[in-house]
Amino acid sequence: MSAKSKAQQKAAGAALAATRGETASSALKGASKPMARSMSVDERAELAATPRKGKPERVGARGAGSRP
């Protein structure tokens, strides 16, 4: 599974860094906090490794470009 947006990729990277002890777990905020609790290390590593090129900055709740 690859990240759908740059924001998701960054959040996974932050959660992965906290798991590895590179940053404090208390420093996590936003989407990275639940990611650290609910996803496996392998899942976070896969999302964090997604290339950012060509990805939107953010994807809405209904998906990219789905505004009425």
Image (cartoon, helix red, strand yellow):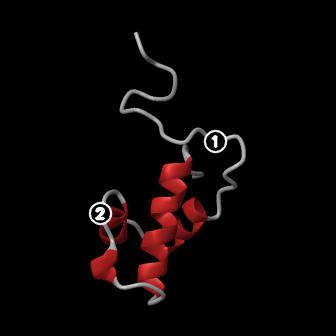
Measuring 70% from the left and 55% from the top, which residue is drawn there?
51
Q: Residue furthest bottom?
A: 21
Where 47 sits versus 15, above or below? above
What's the residue at 46%, 19% (across, down)? 66
Instruction: Give the mark toward the camera: 1 or 2.
Output: 1
Residue 34 got which mark? Answer: 2
Quarter occupied by residue 45: bottom right
Return the disc, 1 or 2, that comes first in the chain's sequence. 2
Q: Which amino acid, mark 1?
A: Lys
Query: Where residue 11 appears, x then y in whole percent?
Result: 45, 61
- The quadrant of the rendering that contains the C terminus is top left
- 17 in relation to 7, above or below: below
SS for tag 2?
Answer: helix
Residue 29 rendering spot, x and y as whole percentages: 30, 65
Q: Are marks 1 and 2 in contact (CB under 8 Å)?
A: no
Residue 23 in percent (x, y) is at 43, 84
Q: Nearer the viewer, residue 18 or 37?
A: 18
Q: Between residue 57 and residue 42, name the one nearer to us.
A: 57
Where residue 55 is drawn, which disc sits there? 1
Disc 2 marks a residue whose amino acid type is Pro
Question: Around disc 1, counting alpha carbons within 10 Å, would you say few (fewer than 14), some (14 to 19), or many (20 or more)?
Answer: some
The part of the image, by quadrant, that contains residue 9 is bottom right
| Alpha carbon distance from label 1 to label 2 | 22 Å
Horizontal side of residue 16 vs 28, given as left or right:
right
x and y, in percent, of residue 7 in the image: 49, 51
Q: Quadrant of residue 36?
A: bottom left
